[in-house]
Image: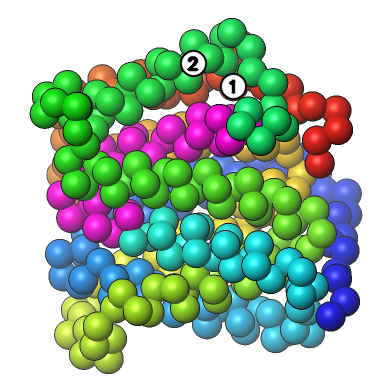
Amino acid sequence: MKETTPQTPTVSLRWVYVAMGFNLVAWGMSWVNVRAIVHEVGSGELGALRYLIASTVMLTVWLGRGRPVPALRDVPLIALLGIFGFTLYNLGINFGERTVDACTGSMLISCVPILVVLFGVLSGREQVTAFAWLGILVSMLGVAFTSGVFQQGLAFNQGTAFIFGSAVCAAVQTVLSKALTKRYAAIDVTTWAILFGTLGLLPFSHDLPGTAARLTPHAWGHLLFLGVVPAALCYTLWAWVLQRLPITTVMGSVYVIPLFSVLFGWAILGEQPGAAALTGGLLTLVGVAIVQTLGAPKAKADAA
């Protein structure tokens, strides 16, 4: 199988930032969509139905592009991208949001940029300044507040543990996606990963036809939005943005997502996060801001 080198034509940075901004709003909204229907459909079924929709959209585009395929040596990496970025990530979110509101969940997962930095340090690809370490500590303190550690002792409750696990998966996904989109078009990487992720979600679902038949029109509206916009469209745009901007710049934008989740959660679901969650969310965002501004890590010269 012949490896496809992605074409990266000159694109106005304005459109790159527009795409990134669109993703932030849509992903902020997606927390509310999941929370709105997670008690009507099982966590596994929600993930499988959402990504069957996304797979249908992506396969249609993939066929229209002439069915490009990856090199055989890259298939294991793509499979890992699908499992971490779509199977495990979505199972964690869906199970977590059964007990954690959309606002708190989105604030908890805003530590993803910090995890990406830590992965870079562990792999030797990033050099972290003293300010960056300060930001990491502040952000981790925020995660502890948001997850209820100071209220419930040194243990995550089940819902926040699931969502924090999803944050780890999202960080892995970002690193893998950045590597793969250096060799392939963003839309192709997203298509292949979503297909693997959907296959991974199917064993966690039961009676999909019966579940689909029982869903209300209201639930189908949320589900179609989740499958088409935050999944198929946004992940493709995100991989495209990662091709054109430094990973620290892109991940620095993630801390805006909870602001949209809080707004949509209040307007649509009437959710009002507690004082501890708001304090933790604010600390997490401050920590991320410190890392991205005062302590932005510098990639090593030989890093790919």
Assess whether residue 146 is covered by the magenta stretch. no
> Which is nearer the eye, 263 or 88?
88
Q: Residue at x 69, y 71 (%)?
A: 75
Q: Measuring from the top left, give residue 110's x and y in whole percent.
A: 42, 35
Is residue 113 at all visible to an observer of this figure? no
In this rendering, is residue 110 above or below 64?
above
> Which is nearer the eye, 6 or 1?
1
Q: Residue at x 55, y 48 (%)?
A: 172
Judging by the rendered image, the residue that carries numbered circle 1 is 292
Is residue 130 at all visible to an observer of this figure? yes
Q: Is residue 232 left or right of residue 217?
A: right
Q: Main secondary structure of the magenta part?
A: helix
Q: Measuring from the top left, give residue 266's x and y in whole percent.
A: 22, 41
Precedes in sequence: disc 1 or disc 2: 2
Range of residues picked out in magenta = 92-120
User: Cβ–Cβ below 8 Å for labels 1 and 2?
Assistant: yes
